[in-house]
């Protein structure tokens, strides 16, 4: 006999049940370490062993796995993944486990949330944890645009990084630069104006809602490069691309001058097993500040060497291949 259940809705459920209750239901609380508002431990979803990959924020009532799952969300997303069921079924399970019933007067006429409501609710509960894969690619990016040649990129590099001038849409006329998550999924396009923008226009654009502090540009390629080489960390896209082109493929960009905590964690992981990191930031005020901060953040977990330039304003992408390789203490081929 099929029991017809009235689903109280995701918002009401998330207000009624906490992540701690859910973890308690699965008997997982003893395995997690508490620090303030946060719980951390091995991920119970992908059954990992790394004790820092799974995090729960009790105040935000959400979770994230920085390991194989590379995903996070609400109580409903957790149960959905743990049970291998859709989120509506996960919601009904939670309702059942905790004996939550809709108030009698409101039991009728509560609409089932539409898929759009669902995704909005999920985003609201844990919006800061991951950038969702984009789900589309920009068509016909022109890799022969003169700006790319001007910046010293060769065809092989342009193709590897998939950069090119966008011909249509809101990015028409801009150079699009694909950004991937650590699993290699496309999560955003950065846009660079080819040349000096007019005063009202920014040099770079990033999509609304995209959180660059959660990603490292080129990380998915850097992780598959020669692991005996140090991981080079730079500020910008073009510095990263130029170092890759010069022959050092273990390079990532933080897409700014200040390293986030999440980026520091990604760097520590990606620089394994030797954990050698070289910081090559721009030689200007923001770069020096960012370098000192990055040194502080990374110094505890990895071996860091910093490269400084003699000339004020110098940037890695302005250097020749030989200069770059000399600074990285590698032999130019
Ligand atoms: Zn996981």
Image (cartoon, rainbow, N blue to C red):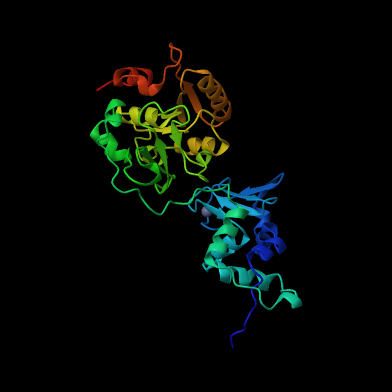
Specify the quadrant of the image occupied by residue 7.
bottom right
Q: Nearer the viewer, residue 70 or 217?
A: 217
Q: Is residue 229 visible?
A: no
Q: Residue at x 64, y 58 (%)?
A: 28
Residue 90 horizontal/vertical position (percent) = 58, 68
Q: Can you say whether 176 is above or below 39 in the image?
A: above
Which x, y percent locates residue 185? 40, 49
Is residue 88 shown to the viewer in this render?
yes
Q: Nearer the viewer, residue 291 or 135?
A: 135
Dividing the image into 4 quarters, which one contains the C terminus?
top left
Q: How many marks?
A: 0
In the rendering, at what x and y percent does residue 194 appear?
35, 31
62 or 69, nearer to the observer: 62
Q: Is residue 101 left or right of residue 241?
A: right
Query: If the image is split into quadrants, where does the N terminus sit?
Result: bottom right
Left or right of 61: which side holds 158? left
Q: In the image, 92: left or right of 326?
A: right
Q: Residue at x 54, y 60 (%)?
A: 119
For residue 11, above or below residue 54: below
Q: Position of residue 135 (x, y in %)?
A: 41, 54
In this view, the residue farthest toward the top is 310
């Amino acid at each position: 006999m099929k029991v017809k259940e009235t689903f109280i809705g995701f918002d009401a459920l998330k207000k009624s049940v906490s992540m701690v209750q859910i973890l308690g239901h699965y008997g997982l609380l003893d395995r997690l370490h508490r620090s303030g508002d946060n719980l951390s431990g091995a991920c119970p979803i992908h059954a990992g062993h790394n004790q820092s990959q799974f995090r729960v924020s009790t105040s935000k009532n959400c979770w994230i796995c920085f390991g194989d799952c590379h995903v996070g969300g609400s109580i409903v997303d957790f149960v959905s993944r743990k049970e291998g069921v859709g989120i509506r079924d996960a919601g009904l399970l939670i309702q059942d486990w905790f004996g939550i019933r809709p108030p009698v007067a409101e039991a009728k006429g509560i609409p089932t949330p539409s898929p759009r409501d669902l995704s909005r609710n999920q985003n609201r509960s844990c919006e800061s944890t991951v950038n969702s894969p984009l789900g589309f690619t920009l068509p016909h990016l022109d890799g022969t645009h003169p700006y790319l040649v001007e910046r010293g990129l060769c065809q092989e590099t342009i193709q590897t990084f998939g950069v090119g001038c966008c011909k249509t849409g809101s990015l028409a006329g801009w150079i699009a630069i694909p950004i991937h998550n650590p699993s290699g999924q496309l999560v955003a396009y950065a846009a660079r104006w080819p040349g000096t923008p007019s005063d009202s226009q920014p040099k770079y654009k990033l999509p609304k809602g995209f959180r660059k502090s959660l990603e490292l540009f080129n990380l998915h390629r850097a992780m598959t490069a020669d692991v005996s080489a140090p991981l080079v960390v730079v500020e910008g896209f073009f510095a990263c691309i130029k170092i890759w082109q010069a022959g050092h493929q273990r390079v990532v960009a933080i897409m700014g001058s200040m390293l986030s905590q999440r980026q520091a964690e990604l760097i520590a992981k990606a620089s394994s097993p030797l954990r050698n990191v070289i910081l090559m930031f721009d030689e200007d005020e923001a770069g020096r500040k960012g370098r000192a901060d990055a040194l502080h953040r990374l110094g505890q977990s990895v071996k860091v060497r910093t490269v400084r330039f003699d000339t004020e304003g110098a940037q890695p992408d302005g250097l020749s291949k030989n200069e770059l390789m000399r600074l990285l203490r590698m032999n130019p081929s």
